[in-house]
Image (tube, helix red, strand yellow):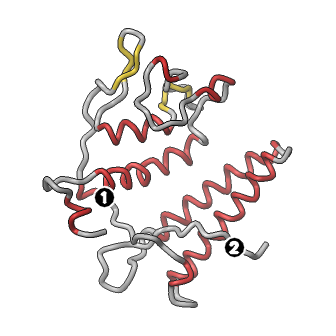
């Protein structure tokens, strides 16, 4: 990431940095709650276009989490971070009129851009950690493929694999991208050939 990308034109974080933070911050929420969208048939009507949610765009974004508390589907949680405000329902419409969501650029975990497992030194701790992530990612995708190919009973296995992948990714993101570097490694999300 260049200094311009990091600092933005007006000295604050630019949209790209904010979106990277949003994605990183939401990973734990995605893993904790699964897909993050309602399990009902109305979930299929959730907007796929990148538009500001409103009552006309589909179902309300509040969904019931396993804990019994109202949670936003991940699509809307990302939008809250991008908009910088909480999404609230007022007079039957959803709008980003809630409390502000503060953004602290010092809290951004600086990850290497375009991670590639193959570019890491063969046999290094970094390469091994990245390969573990790639294997976990590949296995999770294979299991999800089986779920959608008529084996819904494997969904719980896929969820456990997501948790494993999350742990592997967090471990990788604690490793500097090079000695003395200010950036950290990131999952490459590359498919592996081995089974």
111 is higher (above) or lower (below) than 75: below
Figure quadrant of the C terminus: bottom right
136 is higher (above) or lower (below) than 12: below
Instruction: Tell me: 175 left or right of 153.
Output: left
Of labels 1 and 2, earlier in sequence is 1
Q: Secondary structure at mark 2?
A: loop
Q: Secondary structure at mark 1?
A: loop
The circle on residue 192 is 2
Question: Is label 1 or label 2 in front?
Answer: 2
Going 51% across and 84% down the picture, which residue do you hit? 119
**Image location (x, y in percent) of residue 58:** 54, 22
- Label 1: which residue? 108
Residue 133: image quadrant is bottom right
The circle on residue 126 is none
62 is higher (above) or lower (below) than 129: above
Disc 1 and disc 2: Cα gap in Å?
Answer: 29 Å
Figure quadrant of the N terminus: bottom left
């Amino acid at each position: 990431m260049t200094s311009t990308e990091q600092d933005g034109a007006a000295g604050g974080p630019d949209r790209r940095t904010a979106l990277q933070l949003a994605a990183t911050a939401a990973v734990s929420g995605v893993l904790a709650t699964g897909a993050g969208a309602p399990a009902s048939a109305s979930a299929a009507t959730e907007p796929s276009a990148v538009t500001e949610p409103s009552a006309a765009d589909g179902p309300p974004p509040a969904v019931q989490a396993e804990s019994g508390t109202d949670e936003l589907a991940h699509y809307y949680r990302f939008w809250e971070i991008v908009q910088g405000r909480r999404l609230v329902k007022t007079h039957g419409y959803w709008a980003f009129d809630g409390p502000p969501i503060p953004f602290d650029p010092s809290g951004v975990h600086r990850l290497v851009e375009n991670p590639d497992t193959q570019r890491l030194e063969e046999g290094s701790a970094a390469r091994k950690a990245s390969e573990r992530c790639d294997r976990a990612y590949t296995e999770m995708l294979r299991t999800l493929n089986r779920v959608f190919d008529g084996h819904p009973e494997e969904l719980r296995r896929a969820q456990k694999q997501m948790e494993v992948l999350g742990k592997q990714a967090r471990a990788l993101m604690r490793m500097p991208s090079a000695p003395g570097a200010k950036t950290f490694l990131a999952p490459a999300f590359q498919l592996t050939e081995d089974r």
